[in-house]
Image (cartoon, rainbow, N blue to C red):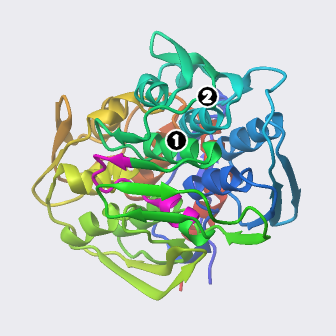
Amino acid sequence: MMMDSLSISKSPMLGDGMTFHPGPLCGELDVPGDKSISHRALIAGAFGGALLRITNLNPGRDVRATREALIALGVRIAADGRETTVRGGALREPAGVLDCMNSGSTARMLLGVCAGAGVHAGFDGDRSLRQRPMEPVAAQLRAFGARIDTTEGHLPVKCRGTPEIQTRRFILLSPSAQVKSALLFAGLFAGVPVRVDGDRGSRAHTERLLRYLGLAVEWDGRSITLAPGSGRQSRESRIEVAGDFSAAAFFITAAAVTPRSSIVIRRAGVNPTRTGLLDVLREMGARIELRNERSVSGEPVADIGVTYAPLHATAVGPELALRAIDEIPLIAIAAAFADGSTTISGIGELRTKESDRIAAIERLLQAVSIEAQVQTAGLTIRGGKPSPPQATIATDDDHRIAMAGAVLGCAAGPLTIDSGQSVDVSFPGFAQALETLQSERV
């Protein structure tokens, strides 16, 4: 091995800004526990009185928001090294408003929990979360029987759960794993069967987790039914959280677009409702291999090998985009290095994530002199040879845009972002992991 010059540097004139330098990625790494599964594991542990032991829980701020909100609802949670223990029971009304921080998963899924458990609670979050829509989940839970008041469709929200259950069959107006999960958790905590129709293959972590824990849940990518009369209410269970594919995705894409790169990401989750990025990159010519495939706590897991290869343009339709919705900024970056014009459609919901991610993608690509045509719910990107940007890139405090900037910097840097603090939402230690891969040579 030989050490390279520092690939990531702080920008003192920008406060917590960071500069990412170009260079190939080589070596192996582990990524943090999956954020989506971590939220759901904590919530599942709150159901019933049996002890649930969780290993590899995601350490980011979003999952901390769920953990602290559940504690406020009376759930006993303790951490000892890599293991977190959860023991639920009857939930109580919290002493104050539940602070969901920046986590839409916390707000939406715990609304379902409180609605089903008959708990009265207030929900709030930071400035960014207050701008994201809550009415889609609130409207469904009102039909279930809860009384929910939003602030013009957003946080702050007041929820008054009710034992008088009404509708038990729901139709999703648009596919949403968070809304779907909120309805399943409402049925679980109310002790009533529910059915959710209208899904189109959104991520299925809740379904897999509940089945792993012994609950009667069936799904086919379109409809989900839950009969909560069985399960883990009286027996201790264990969950090992798979490595976060969305965290792995940044390194996968960086290696795919940066010449001379070759990496392996160990123990990453490869749930097919999450791995649309792999399908897109393979269609573009990326060299990606899944090794040592196995199942961990009901989730498919593999070691992901990526070796650089030249890319060509492709078309990403709505169904494939749904399976890669968090990775659309990375697909756009790959398209910037691909030969030809790539189209991405069906991504309108990116307008209401932690930031307007379609606008953020446009900023990223313009900064490296790549042409992008923006539609209301889509993008067309003309690939080429991105050039180092001449100005600092604004991230809008969005963790995925900050890390996407780092990926772009690996092949088109040096690239400076205005802030790296948001990365702690999902991946504390991201910059150090990237620096380690860029400092190793085989």
Image height check: is 420 above or below 29?
above
| Amino acid of disc 1 | Ala
User: Between disc 1 and disc 2, whose residue precedes?
Assistant: 2
Which quadrant does the N terminus fall into? bottom right
Residue in front for this viewpoint, 256 or 125: 125
The verdict on residue 265 being magenta is no
Residue in front for this viewpoint, 78 or 11: 78
What separation in Å lies between label 1 and label 2 (alpha carbons)? 40 Å
Q: Are marks 1 and 2 in contact (CB under 8 Å)?
A: no
Q: Count of labels shown?
A: 2
Depth check, mark 1 against mark 2: the one in front is 1
| Circle 1 residues within 10 Å: few <14, some 14–19, many ≥20 | many
| Amino acid of disc 2 | Leu
Could you tell whether 421 is left or right of 25 in the image?
right
Residue 421 location (% of width, % of height): 65, 37
- The disc label shown at residue 14, or none: 2
Residue extent of the magenta highlight:
196-210
Residue on which the image places disc 1:
182
**Res. 162 in view:** yes
| Circle 2 residues within 10 Å: few <14, some 14–19, many ≥20 | few
Q: Residue at x 46, y 9 (%)?
A: 152
The verdict on residue 205 being magenta is yes
Q: Quadrant of residue 101?
A: top right
Residue 41 location (% of width, % of height): 66, 57
Q: Quadrant of residue 213?
A: bottom right
